[in-house]
Amino acid sequence: MSQAGLNLKYLRKLRGWTQEEFANKLNVKRSLIGAYEEERADPRLEVLEMVSEMFKVSLDEMLLKDLSENQSSYWMKRRNQKLGTTTKNNLIHFVPVKAAAGYLAGYADTEFIEELNTFTLPMLSGGNYRAFEIIGDSMLPTPSGSIIVGEKVQNLDDLKSNTPCIVVSMQEGIVYKRVVKNNRSKNKLTLVSDNPAYQPYQVNAEDVAEIWMAQMIIGKVADQQRWDVNTLANLVNNLQDQVSSLTKKMN
């Protein structure tokens, strides 16, 4: 029996690629990668040749050997190194905006989570972390496009009120808000934006699938402000007026 499909999946995960990324590198559809890995279809020869060249393994090895069980192989050593790194460092799965809809359906699916890109931050340790890209201006001054790294909240009672969090619910989707617990009713949570233009609103606690307490914000470097001639001229005139006023007072 051909090992090609299982080996494709093993080699892809070894590099940390999603099925979409692997498909783009091989110039095929993502659904075809899924069919190969689930052994619903046999990989075409040209695909196997590209993978063999990419990972420096022979076609015989791709077809006949289970690369994940070859303890002496270079690839097994790479996998063990990867697993060792994962143990020592907290692997953070990243949920971009384009994956938000899929995350709502697959947040509890281990296979789906493994498909997400990952990274590590040396200053975070000893917790379960995840990163989410946020879009919109409801949390200004945190700009749209920022990445919020949050730690999983296991018990809502341990969460302090007014804490900024990523809240995942089927009704609201993935939102970044301050969570205010309702003292009168434990079944309600109030979500508050930092931007006062947005009104607070309530959600049912039972509808919330996950809460990730914000630990870090990763953002792009701000563009350098450009001054035009008129702005500079006005600035100089204002300074001259101030100097004139101070000179009169001193005289």
Image (spheres, grey):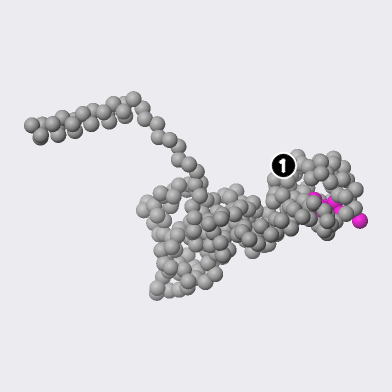
Compare residues 205 and 220 and report the one nearer the observer.
220
Q: Which residue is mark 1?
A: 24
Outermost residue, left side: 251
Question: Mostly what secondary structure, the magenta segment?
Answer: helix
Q: In the rendered view, tell whether residue 87 sits above or below residue 183.
A: above
Residue 2 part of the magenta segment:
yes
User: Which element type, helix, strand or loop, lies under badge 1?
Assistant: helix
Residue 94 pos. (x, y %): 60, 53
Compare residues 143 and 247 and report the one nearer the observer.
247
Examine the image and state in which quarter residue 239 appears: top left
Q: Is residue 247 left or right of residue 134?
A: left
Residue 225 part of the magenta segment:
no
Q: Amino acid at mark 1?
A: Asn
Q: Is residue 225 left or right of residue 127?
A: left
Which quarter of the rendered picture does the N terminus lie within? bottom right
Can residue 241 be seen here? The reply is yes
- Residue drawn where x is 40% and y is 55% of the image: 194
Q: Is residue 163 left or right of residue 149?
A: left
Residue 113 pos. (x, y %): 65, 58
- How many numbered discs sit on the rendered protein? 1
> Crowding at label 1, few (<14), some or many (≥20) Cα neighbours within 10 Å?
few
Which quarter of the rendered picture does the C terminus lie within? top left
Can residue 167 be seen here? The reply is no
Q: In the rendered view, tell whether residue 179 sits above or below residue 243.
A: below
Residue 243 pos. (x, y %): 18, 31
Compare residues 156 and 83 and report the one nearer the observer.
83
Residue 10 pos. (x, y %): 78, 54
Magenta stretch in the rendered image: 1-8
Compare residues 25 and 177 and report the one nearer the observer.
25
Examine the image and state in which quarter residue 163 appears: bottom left
Q: In the rendered view, tell whether residue 34 sits above or below residue 151.
A: above
- Residue drawn where x is 60% and y is 59% of the image: 90
